[in-house]
């Protein structure tokens, strides 16, 4: 028997409901109603739900309407700030008006999205130390701070978003003194969290949710300890985010900022201890030596770092310098709140480094990310199912939805990763007419993946033909930056359409330009595989260079593979294949975004048809026309106006 909530939801999606009355050209979609009913049942009957909703189902309204009508305290978590703001600024206000209900809603962002009055005050006090340009931005921010009601830096338009001032005036956990702060009563971060506490529906993003849930950052975990319902949109991102938050990391930037912060505190407040500045400077030298040695050697596996005498020596030197400084700071505790905070952070960093050196956890991967300006050490658990079972407590209804969760028509892989085997699992296919809207082509006569002839010459030839047939209007998605650069270079002068290459400008700038030009070709790697919505005639072709398998040298993969083998499982079928299927589905999902869209997907990797595992990919993709005849695909492209 359906609940009262479910009956109300069914009515609102019917021809007599709120959507039919207020949405222009509204037409009933059974899959959307089915999803709304599934969400309503999960809320009313108190069970967890994993639901894949194909593109076009209309999943946003399908979970927001039950959330608004339920009377429960609901947290909606998204994978991106863009979707977070769309829900809060557009979708929720529209639905509140349509449904004629009064439900308090709030948008809660991470603390570094809010201005910190204390840090701004400190910057203003030391303004004479800065450049003219820095002071100009600082004064603009100070003026804005007196007018802003919420302190959301995203609403600051008078200063460029990449201004050097912004990182120095936003709220951070490291510089927050809580109730001791003179600005506590007017703190923008605190106000945002109070609004969240007083609201029925709160919109956050995944990173904030897990940071507050797991790290218990002061505020959200205390203000909303037990929401009745948590809905994760873009839920395919949740497993990786859980791995990140159940693990730990240390960045060279974090160490650099902390050491420089201690030097500033010493100069401004505690000037009678020469040791503090001397040891801080020694730490910065040790950090520089460590960064240079690590970057020069390019070793991404931390265990190999420790086996290298030179790298181990500079790593130990850094750890020792931090420990020495922490010992000195310990003697000055109680003299200055910011110094007390710095001691806690420094002590924690030194202990983390010690844990890295010991590498005791066999159920974790120890990896290194290397860049010219930063180093990131990561400890990543290879399995988070048990931790997730504890996190996803029985008091709350947990709902996970995305367009890309199933592998080979099963949601089992996602459920197993998060320890949610008892959750109800539903797959709702896209209502789009894929057999008539799209063609999927794997061209014949492609070279073997990894061979130089395949990797550039043949791929470029396919790209040139497709770009010309589509009159631009093409995304070319790559699995590596190296391949992107080679193809981008080779395409110069071979096509008459504008080439937009990742790295030339920000992601959003490139997408804006792609939409403005109307005949452009965009080349990108992983960040363009998802979260990109280009509808209509602007995008007619998506080309993918190869199946997106994780590198066998990836430290986390190697640790998870070894663990699978210890359990008698095949790492490829249990780890590599499901991850690659989800990633490919994300890339493919860029093509057809609307019921009127038409387009061609070209995958330049014949393993999908030549290997037995290829069927798992095919079964997981929308039912497009399939062909190996490139000419047929090009002809379809030419017919798109």
Image: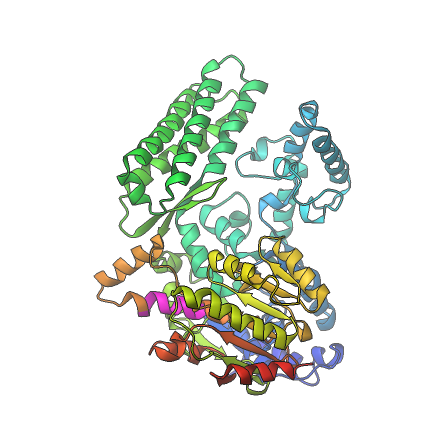
User: Would you place residue 45 above or below residue 143 in this image?
Assistant: below
Question: Residue 591: x percent and y percent?
Answer: 58, 74
Front position in the image: 472 or 380 = 472
Any part of residue 186 in sight: yes
The boundaries of the magenta stretch are: 573-582
User: Colour scheme used in the picture?
Assistant: rainbow
86 to the left or right of 51:
right
Front position in the image: 197 or 76 = 76
Residue 420 on the magenta segment: no
In the rendered image, which quarter is residue 76 located in?
bottom right
User: Would you place residue 98 above or below residue 272 in this image?
Assistant: below
Pick the quarter of the image with the C terminus.
bottom right
348 to the left or right of 640:
left
Question: Residue 138: x percent and y percent?
Answer: 71, 34
Residue drawn 63% across the image and 62% down it: 499
Residue drawn 57% across the image and 62% down it: 523
Any part of residue 152 in sight: no
Question: Residue 277: x percent and y percent?
Answer: 49, 19
User: Would you place residue 142 above or below residue 576 in this image?
Assistant: above
Question: Residue 618: x percent and y percent?
Answer: 43, 79
In the rendered image, which quarter is residue 175 located in?
top right
In the rendered image, which quarter is residue 267 located in?
top right
- Chief secondary structure of the magenta portion: helix
């Amino acid at each position: 028997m359906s609940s009262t909530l479910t009956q109300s939801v069914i009515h609102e999606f019917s021809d007599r409901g709120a959507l039919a009355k207020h949405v222009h050209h509204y037409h009933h979609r059974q899959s959307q109603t089915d999803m709304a009913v599934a969400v309503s049942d999960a809320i009313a009957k108190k069970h967890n739900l994993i639901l894949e909703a194909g593109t076009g189902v209309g999943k946003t309204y399908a979970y927001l309407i039950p959330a608004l009508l339920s009377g429960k305290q609901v947290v909606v978590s998204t994978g991106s700030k863009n979707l977070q703001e769309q829900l809060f600024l557009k979708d929720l206000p529209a639905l509140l008006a349509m449904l004629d209900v009064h439900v308090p809603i709030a948008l809660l962002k991470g603390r570094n999205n809010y201005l910190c009055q204390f840090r701004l005050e400190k910057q203003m006090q030391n303004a004479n130390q800065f450049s003219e340009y820095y002071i100009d931005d600082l004064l603009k921010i100070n003026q804005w701070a007196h007018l802003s009601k919420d302190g959301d830096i995203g609403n600051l338009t008078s200063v460029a978003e990449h201004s050097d001032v912004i990182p120095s005036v936003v709220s951070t956990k490291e510089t927050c003194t809580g109730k001791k702060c003179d600005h506590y009563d007017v703190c923008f971060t605190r106000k945002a969290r109070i609004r969240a506490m007083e609201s029925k529906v709160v919109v956050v993003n995944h990173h904030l949710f897990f940071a507050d849930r797991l790290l218990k950052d002061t505020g959200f975990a205390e203000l909303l300890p037990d929401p009745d319902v948590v809905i994760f949109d873009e839920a395919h991102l949740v497993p990786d985010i859980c791995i990140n938050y159940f693990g730990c990391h240390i960045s060279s930037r974090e160490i650099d900022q902390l050491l420089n912060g201690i030097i500033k505190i010493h100069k401004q407040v505690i000037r009678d201890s020469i040791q503090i500045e001397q040891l801080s400077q020694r730490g910065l030298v040790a950090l520089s030596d460590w960064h240079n040695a690590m970057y020069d050697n390019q070793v991404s596996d931390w265990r190999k770092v420790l086996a290298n005498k030179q790298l181990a020596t500079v790593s130990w030197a850094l750890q020792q310098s931090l420990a020495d400084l922490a010992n000195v700071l310990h003697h000055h505790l109680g003299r200055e709140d910011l110094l007390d905070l710095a001691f806690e952070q420094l002590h924690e960093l030194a202990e983390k480094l010690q844990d890295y050196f010991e590498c005791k956890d066999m159920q974790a991967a120890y990896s290194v990310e290397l860049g010219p300006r930063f180093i990131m050490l990561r400890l990543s658990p290879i399995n988070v199912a048990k931790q997730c079972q504890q996190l996803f407590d029985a008091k709350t209804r947990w709902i996970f939805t995305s367009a890309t969760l199933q592998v080979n028509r099963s949601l089992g892989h996602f459920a197993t990763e998060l320890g949610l085997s008892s959750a109800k699992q539903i797959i709702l296919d896209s209502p789009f007419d894929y057999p008539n809207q799209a063609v999927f082509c794997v061209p014949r006569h492609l070279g073997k993946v990894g061979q130089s002839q395949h990797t550039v010459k043949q791929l470029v030839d396919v790209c040139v033909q497709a770009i010309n047939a589509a009159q631009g209007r093409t995304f070319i998605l790559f699995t590596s930056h190296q391949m992107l650069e080679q193809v981008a270079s080779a395409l110069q002068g071979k096509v008459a359409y504008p080439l937009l290459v990742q790295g030339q400008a920000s992601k959003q700038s490139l997408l804006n330009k792609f939409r403005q030009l109307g005949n452009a070709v965009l080349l990108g790697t992983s960040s363009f595989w998802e979260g990109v919505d280009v509808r209509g005639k602007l995008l007619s072709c998506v080309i993918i260079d190869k199946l997106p398998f994780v590198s066998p040298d990836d430290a986390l993969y190697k640790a998870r593979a070894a663990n699978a083998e210890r359990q008698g499982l095949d790492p490829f079928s249990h780890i590599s294949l499901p991850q690659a299927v989800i990633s490919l589905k994300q890339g493919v999902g860029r093509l057809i975004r609307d019921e009127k869209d038409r387009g061609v997907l070209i995958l330049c990797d014949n393993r999908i048809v030549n290997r037995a595992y290829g069927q798992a990919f095919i079964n997981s993709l929308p039912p497009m026309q399939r062909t190996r005849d490139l000419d047929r695909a090009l002809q379809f492209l030419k017919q798109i106006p």
